[in-house]
Every structure is written in C-alpha cells, then in structure tokens.
Image (tube, grey):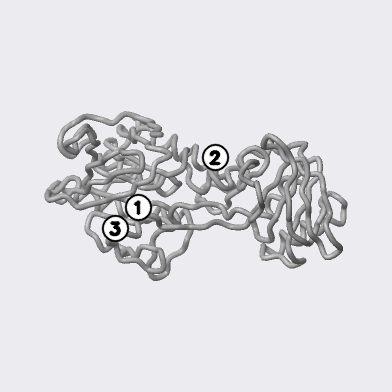
Amino acid sequence: MAAENGATGGGGPGRDGQGFGTGGITTDVVIIGAGPVGLFAVFELGLLDIKCHVVDILGKVGGQCAELYPEKPIYDIPGLPVVTGQELTDRLMEQIKPFGATFHLGERVDALERLPDGRFALSTDIGSRFNTRVVVIAAGGGSFTPKRPPLDGIEAYEGQSVHYSVRRMEDLRGKDVLIVGGGDSALDWTLNLAPLAKSLTLLHRRDEFRGAPHSVERMRALVEEGKVRLMIGQVTALSGADGQLSAVTIKTKNGDEEILVTALLPFFGLTMKLGPIAGWGLNLDENLIPADTAKFETSEPGIFAIGDINTYPGKLKLILSGFHEAALMAQQAHRYVHPGKKLLFQYTTSSTNLQKKLGVR
C-alpha cells in the first residue's frame, strides 16, 4: 500500500504534481529509503526549495532504527547524549514537517530509466510511477530480511509469538522468553528484557559469544544471579496452537529438553540485498555504491548515494556521517533542480529566509 504524509505541493514542470504521461507523479527528487539519513535529506533539500517524495519498502518510516531497535539507545548523535531509534525518527519527522514531503511506504522501487529530457522515470512494485530530476539512494544496506531459523512450521507463529525484532518491550512483559543467538542483538535484548520477562532463557550453540565483552560479562552475572537461564544447544521443534507458542524442544549435549516458551526471539542476523538497484547500471563495489566525497554522486549523473549504501575512502557507517553526506548531496542536487539559479549559502541561525521556511519566524 502507499502511505502518504504531507502535501504534494503545486503542479507544473519540475515541481510536485501529476505528470509522467499516464498519471504518474512529477517531482524534484525521489529519495529511496526513509531511514534517518533519508529523512535528514528531506530537510537539507527543503532548505533549498526542493520537493521530495520518499519511497521505502518498510511499512513505516525510520528504516533499521525504527524496525530493528526502536527502543535501543543510540549514544553518538551530536547534541543528543542518548536517544532511541524511534525517538530519533520522531524528532527527524518533526524537523522535516515544514517541507511537506510525501511518503510511499510498503513499496519497492523496481525500475529506473533515464528519459530523453535527462529526467528519471521510476516505478514501484505496486505500480506507482515517478518522473524526477534527481534520485537519492538512502537505502541503508539495501532491502533486508531476517534470517529465519530452519524450523518446521515457524511461519505460523511469526508476528504473534515469534519476533525477529523488538518493537515494544512492554509486549514481552510477563512472557516466558527464549532468545536465540550469540551476537550483540541477542545479548542486548537479554539484558534489556530480563527485568520484564516472567522468565528469560538465552540459547546459543556454543558457550562463546560474538558480542561486546562487557555485554557478555553482564549476561553471565545475570545467569549467576538466577535472573537469566543460559542454555547451550539448538531449537529443534516448536509447540503451540493458533500462532501462540507454548513450548520449544532444545537439543543439548545431554539430550532433548522441552522448556516453556511463549515468546521466541531468534537473532540469526539479516540478509541484506541491493535488490533491483543492482540492475540500474551503477558502478558497484561488493554490493555498495561508490560515491565521490564532494557531492556524493554516483557514476550516473543525477543519482546520489548517501548513508550505509555508499562507499568511498575512509567511509564510516555512522548516522552522523550520513547526515554530512546529505548536506553535500543537496548542494549538487540544486544544480539539477534549479539549473542556472545561483545558490546562496545561508545559515539557519541568521537567515530570515530559512527561518521563514522552518516556520520559526
């Protein structure tokens, strides 16, 4: 489905409106990816009078921050000593509100082609079509899906009692929780959910963990205190009815053991795929998109890559790096959207023009 948020703006060539010949949407920029970096790109482009439509395969904004760790604290966003993935998303949505971006959620951009006039035509898997001067790829690592454990019948429990991410910790309060995995996600949620769960078991195939050493130490301390049960083995069978788990069978070195479980959290990692982007004729480097460091443009003029999807010498996969990339991208995008118009660099602290756009003056 397409979810929209904000106005589309006025019609006419190069501005948001109906076009594309057969009822598609004509706009300045299409941003692929509604994670933090894609959202901040809306802000930077909006300051330059550039209208955006944002497309994301997920059903809500926020990208991996909101989907995988909405309540997990983030400590390296400038000016915010601590903020959760969902809080960061909410703050960014508030920040970009003045610019009226339109969101198309639960859609995947499948096709892109260069039109004779230099614009781009894009279409999604549900039939949305766009005609745009600029394309900004802010798709993180691409479309991602959790790795599903090889267990018979697990699909019947997914979304009700089997969860591949934690969206609301309160939903797990009072549950008999089994967390499976040995990395940071498994350890982090073991530590966060232990005070809420009725019982919590951490299961890993061996007594060695890939997560941060201090997290491993804290987990083992909870085990010694009797607040967490640590098991070494693997899940072999699920029991339950109508989507609700009641127990799982675990194979250990001492044989099979059935334990009471009403919520299963398997953290086996994610499968990241570029998806259709891989076929758009861009230069690729191990499933990442090389971009220059002056304007973060790809090998195709008018197509930009910002955030974790891009690569360049010295690249750091940090949200704050993506924010910097979005700012420089917007400067170059202005040349395509407003050709011949001089770009005057302004500061939000002193420009009455920018302050009016932001609604603070």
Is label 1 in contact with label 2 (beta carbons under 8 Å)?
no
Tell me, yes or no, if residue 321 can be seen here: no
Could you tell me residue 90's position as x and y percent?
50, 37
- Which residue lies under the disc numbered 3? 280
At x 40%, y 55%, the residue is: 275
- Which residue lies under the disc numbered 2? 87
Q: Amino acid at mark 1?
A: Ile
At x 18%, y 39%, the residue is: 14
Q: Is residue 163 left or right of residue 345?
A: right
At x 39%, y 65%, the residue is: 311
The residue lying toward the viewer, choosing from 306 and 116, is 116
Q: Residues within 10 Å of mark 3 (few under 14, many from 20)?
A: few
Q: Amino acid at mark 3?
A: Trp
Lower position in the chain sequence, tag 1 or tag 2: 2
Q: Amino acid at mark 2?
A: Glu
Which picture quadrant has residue 267? bottom right
Q: Judging from the image, what secondary structure is the residue with disc 1 in?
A: strand
- Which residue lies under the disc numbered 1? 137
Could you tell me residue 223's position as x and y percent?
83, 55
Lower position in the chain sequence, tag 3 or tag 2: 2
Q: Residues within 10 Å of mark 2 (few under 14, many from 20)?
A: some
At x 30%, y 55%, the residue is: 304
- Is residue 199 shown above or below 358? below
